Image: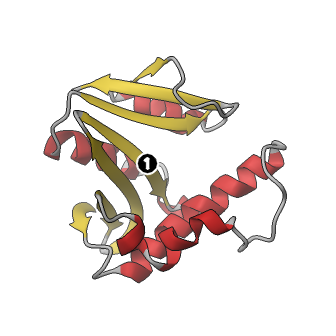
Amino acid sequence: MISIRLVDPAAEPDVVGRLVGNYLRQTEREKAQRGLAAPAADTALPARYEREISHPAEAFENCQVVMAAVDGVPAGIVVTQSVADVIEIKRLWVEPQHRGKSVGSALIEHVLAFTHADVYRLTVWDWREPALATYRRLGFEIVESWDPRAHLVCLQRVG
């Protein structure tokens, strides 16, 4: 059974840091495989991400952090940040052993149901086709890029 809840990163820094760290490490590995980042050791990350893992309460101070659990075990996370009338969705991650169980959809659906914005927006790497398909199924549309990085797809959904 999937359960979704808001998480206080100050109260649960280890689980938030672990899930976000898993997301960041996987992303860096995928970027390196495509020549978009320098190859690194499995545990190495660029220094700019250290705070998100070691001090998530500081890194996500003005954000909401939502966690999914499957049968009580942390299975996924998403971070949102409200900027004016836009909610930015970032750091969506589902642990590999829980993929295909609708955990990612449940996290996004929670954000859409319990936040209010004129626009929801996010980015996803173009090779992450299952994630892209999920976002499109949930009403997000590909829009002109606001991010200059190659292979990054920008999507938004009107509130």
Front residue of 80/92: it is: 80
Q: Secondary structure at mark 1?
A: strand
In the picture provided, is 112 more to the left or to the right than 45? left
* Amino acid on which the number 1 mark rests in the picture: Lys
Q: Looking at the picture, how far across and down is residue 130, in whole percent?
A: 54, 37
Q: Quarter holding the N terminus?
A: bottom left
Q: For residue 14, what is the image quadrant?
A: bottom left
Q: Residue at x 71, y 74 (%)?
A: 43
Residue bearing the label numbered 1: 90
In the picture provided, is 33 more to the left or to the right than 16? right
Q: For residue 26, what is the image quadrant?
A: bottom right
User: In this picture, is 23 found above or below 154?
Assistant: below
Q: Looking at the picture, how far across and down is residue 39, in whole percent?
A: 84, 59
Q: Looking at the picture, how far across and down is residue 12, in whole percent?
A: 33, 80
Q: Quarter holding the C terminus?
A: top left
Q: Looking at the picture, how far across and down is residue 4, in whole percent?
A: 24, 60
Q: Residue at x 42, y 66 (%)?
A: 59
Q: Residue at x 32, y 62 (%)?
A: 68
Front residue of 10/129: it is: 10
User: In this picture, is 32 found above or below 153?
Assistant: below
Front residue of 37/126: it is: 37
- Outermost residue, front direction? 84
User: In this picture, is 150 found above or below 109?
Assistant: above
In the picture provided, is 157 more to the left or to the right than 55? left
Q: How many marks?
A: 1
User: In this picture, is 97 found above or below 142?
Assistant: below
Mark 1 burial class by Cα count in 10 Å: few <14, some 14-19, many 20+: some
Q: Residue at x 75, y 70 (%)?
A: 42
